Amino acid sequence: PLTTHQLWMVSLSAPVSRDRSASRTTLYPYVRIDDDSARRWLADQWEITSREALVGRLDDLSRSGYRARAYRQTGVSPLAWDAALYVDITRRGFACGLIGEGDAWTALKNIVPTVVRQYASWQEYADHYLLGRQVWRAGLRDAADSDLPASQAVADEHLKALLDPENRASPWNLAPWDAISHPDRTP
């Protein structure tokens, strides 16, 4: 079982993980062991096939990522989009063995201070995630909506479910935003 802080860190990628095969409450990103899917996804979506490529991509997302383009277009720097991708890539890198568990937790801990400084709630995080996603989608003008991982409406509904206080399965309800600022505990 994860501590509250570990669950909080993993929950940063909850907006990205929409399908039934995704685990939102473990370091391992799937509900069933599927290292090959993680390996294929990293190679196909991010051209990550080595530890060095993984570390390089994480470094890019932590430094500037997509938020630099978003800032030029909107005047807002949506760190949440990059943070969600950063955590998702870290978890998948762990799943396929490009990094070990200790390195995965270290990578996740590295992004926490920046995220906590920027946002005061899961709602703010979700709003900036959606803004970053919209800028990303706008950059894919040639792709039909059906070719993308999910329509904007699906992403909006997913975030609405994550934020719903009645949703007992939401990792954001299991690890409230301010939990990261209090002493860690095992739930």
Image (spheres, grey):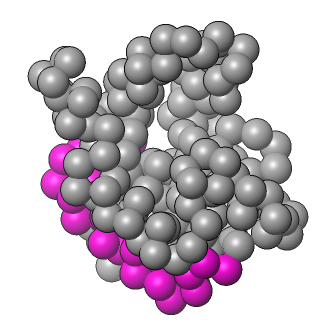
Residue stretch in magenta: 97-124
Tell whether 46 sits left or right of 145.
left
Q: Residue at position x 65%, y 23% from top?
A: 148
Residue at 31% x, 46% y: name it. 65
Q: How far across and down, in percent of the image, does residue 101 sit?
A: 57, 85
Give coordinates of residue 21: x percent, y percent.
Answer: 82, 50
In the image, is residue 68 above or below residue 169? above
Q: Is residue 133 above or below residue 25?
A: above
Q: Main SS of the magenta segment?
A: helix
Query: Is residue 26 visible from the viewing direction of this image?
Result: no
Q: Of 174 and 2, which appears nearest the observer?
A: 2
Magenta includes 87? no
Quarter of the image where one finds residue 153:
top right
Q: Position of residue 24 (x, y in %)?
A: 65, 55
State which quarter of the image contains the N terminus.
Answer: bottom right
- In the image, 145 versus 167, the foreground residue is 145
Q: Quadrant of the C terminus?
A: bottom right
Query: For this view, does 48 lie left or right of residue 62?
Result: right
Q: Is residue 28 visible?
A: yes
The residue located at (26%, 37%) in the rendering is 67
Please determine whether, in this image, residue 41 is positioned above or below residue 27: above
Q: Is residue 31 above or below residue 123?
A: below
